[in-house]
Amino acid sequence: MNLPKPSLRVVFLLAVLVPLIGAFLWLALTSGPLAPVPVTLTTVEMRPVTPTLFGVGTVEARYTYRIGPTYAGRVRRVEVQVGDRVEAGQLLGEMDPVDLDDRVAAADAALRRAESGVVAAHAQVGDAQARRDFAGAQVARYEQLLLSRTASEDTAEAKRQEAQVAEAGLALAVANLESAEQDLVRVRAEREALVQQRANLRLIAPVDALVVSRDAEPGSTVVAGQSVVEVIDPSHLWIDVRFDQLGAGALRADLGARIALRSLPLDTLPGEVLRIEPRSDAVTEEFRAKIAFSTLPEPLPEPLPRLGELAEVTVALEPLEPAPALPNAALHRRDGQLGVWVLDDGGPRFAAVETGARDLEGWVQIRDGLASGDRVILHSRVPLRPGRRVEIVERIPGLPR
Amino acid sequence: MISLAGRDILHAWGKFVFTGVGLGLLIGVTLSMAGIYRGMVDDAEVLLDNSGADLWAVQKDTLGPYAEPSTLADDLYRGILTLPGVARAANVTYLTMQVRPVAPNQAASNQTSDPAGDEAARERRAMIVGVVPGGFGEPGQPPFLVAGRHLTRGHYEAVADVTTGFRLGEQVRIRRNLYTIVGLTRRAVSSGGDPMVYIPLKDAQEAQFLKDNDAIIAQRRRTAANPVFNRPGQPEVLDAVLAAQTQSSSVNAILVRLEPGADADEVAADIRRWKHLTVYTRAEMNEILQAKLIATSARQIFMFLVILSVVSAAIVAFIIYTLTLGKIREIAVLKLIGTRNRTIAGMILQQAVGLGVIGFVVGKTVATLWAPIFPKYVLLLPGDAARGFLVVVIICVLASLVAIRAALRVDPAEAIGG
């Protein structure tokens, strides 16, 4: 028998076939339905879950002043540019007075005329008084002459009548004086009104402010109430923020907040919840709240938070008492029941749990169904079903590094 | 008794094994093709599974949201929630677009610049799914994660499928906003096989319905130039019109999950009748995806699969036949020395089946090995493999029968003749 030759062939054949069969069996057991599912485990931890709310809002000014005329007119000049800081009482611009200045001049003339009228009336009163005094003296003299019979009764009567006329003349002059004085008051008041109107055309800054928009240029016509210059109080900025109503029940005023502006996503500014608007948005299902910057340093930082800039606001609610908690990736819903996969001897088993508060880092409090220290499945490579073979790994294979 | 087949195989084992490996590669291609077809169908099914819905409420008279565009007001779900039999209802939006990761330094400056080479290379086509954050296990949410956590914030977080290649903690740009990847899931794909990226609903609505900045500014200018909207003396009208133009309160569909025991058709009929929406049940949606959306491409692949199977079967048969005919001289010698026909037939049959088994093992192995390299999902079903094995063995047996017939008719004289 030439044994060596065939046995060498057998060895060669087996050297090819055995690894092939081995590879086949290995693949059948490691991929496909027979393969164990790689899973990672996590432990139920006692930890204080700090529910946090995340909202997005825009920077807005708390006090905005739209400075414009009270009735329609043409803009004569605008003294400030956007970005200027102005002080309370500073002139921002002026409306075209049209004929108002001329009317003030006319009122001035009328005032002087009225004053002259008063002077004239005074003179008239003096004149009438002189006449009356003279007529009174004449009457007294003729009364004596009548007693001495050196004057006729007729002449004395005439003098008495002259005295009465002079008296009436004085009364007239006094009344004229009164009238002239009232006229002066009227004319003066009218002039005052015109001056007031003229002043009303001047656009004045109500507070120390920052000019944010210049809405009309000199020469343009604006209607009553339309703004020519818009100024804000830069020391009172807040964020009009929206929080999803989902889980935002514990939002309260005075809670601390972290504000991240879109222009500076890596820095956060401290803030606090100023108020929650009583009226929430029914369409978008969001609460609206105002977040104030807690300390805007003095002098104000440059650049300022820009109005209308997007800001992300994170509000930490009151931390809860430490309680069993799990990452939310461990929770699954199966047949309408929320629960976790617990690893038993016979493979994974679905255990229903009752959940409580959640935070933004994904921790969920477990109220019922698990105790602290229990091991549950966190991640799995495919959806699990009861009794499926699993293999515990540190990290699900195939993830991008 | 000595195995005649074994002896013969040992005699020319190299030829035998390499023929088997060649057959195996051919079988592997066929199995892969079946896997590609199954993967395509599975993509459609997994889309429905992942949505976690029993019913889809969509815009009236559309095949939405997967097969046709569909737009609904985003407050309609409240009405659906009140219907008997409805356990949960959630808005969802779907939008397929390019998503690319953003380098950290670029994220800090938050500027839109031309992507560097790395980011451009890692740009992926993805289906953006807008879901209500916080409600894990709600309809529309990813059913399971392989890393990280579910969405918790109402904005600017994303959970991505691993095939996007995005890493945990990485930032990706979708339209004008940056999103941080907080979780990874697997097998979350659209019917076209694009990986899914889950983002909060409100962001998704914005991404889908909000125009880009240039378009918004151009629209503002157009509106401001229109004297109907920009009336002298009524400056507030323009502001009101501009505000109205940037509203986005639409979604693509409402995913409805039923109470246990509720009748899907009954609830669907209720929604159709009272909410004036079109509703699809799971079976109907499956029908839409299979028969309408992927029908042509699936049939295309299936046709190719059929042709490939036929060609493979033919090649396997020919190889076995020619292998046998190549040994016709030896068979004549065997006959000459008085070997029984049964023995000769058994030898040929055993060799053929052996060749088939080796081919199948090689084929299954290589198909399993190269399946993960395919860009789209290749689903190798054990049932398909079993069927394939059966078919290979039957073909081998049939081919060897033809060969046996030829071998038995050989004239023993040929062994000594010329």
Image: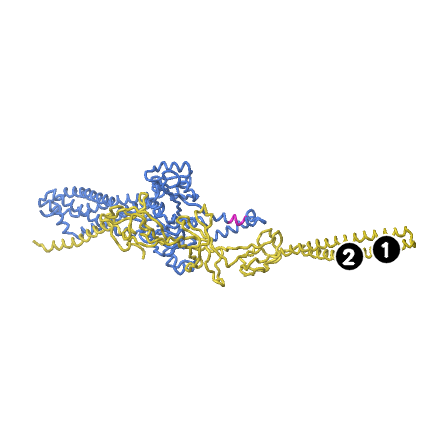
Chain colours: A yellow, B blue
- Secondary structure under tag 1 reads helix
Report if residue A326 is visible in the image: no
Label 2 environment density (alpha carbons within 10 Å; few <14, some 14–19, many ≥20): some
The three-letter amino acid code for the residue at tag 1 is Ala
Per the rendering, the mark at residue A140 is: 1
User: Residue B294, position in %: x, y?
Assistant: 35, 44
Q: Is residue A223 left or right of residue B1?
A: right
Image-based side of A17 in relation to B237, left or right = left
**Host chain of mark 1:** A
Question: Splitting the image into 4 quarters, where does residue B267 fall?
Answer: top left
Q: Are marks 2 and 1 in contact (CB under 8 Å)?
A: no
Which disc, if any, is residue A120? 2
* Nearer-the-camera pick, A27 or B400: A27
Is residue A181 something one can see in this rendering? yes
Task: Name the outermost residue toward the bottom.
Answer: A299
Q: Are marks 2 and 1 on the same chain?
A: yes
Q: Residue at x 59, y 54 (%)?
A: A68
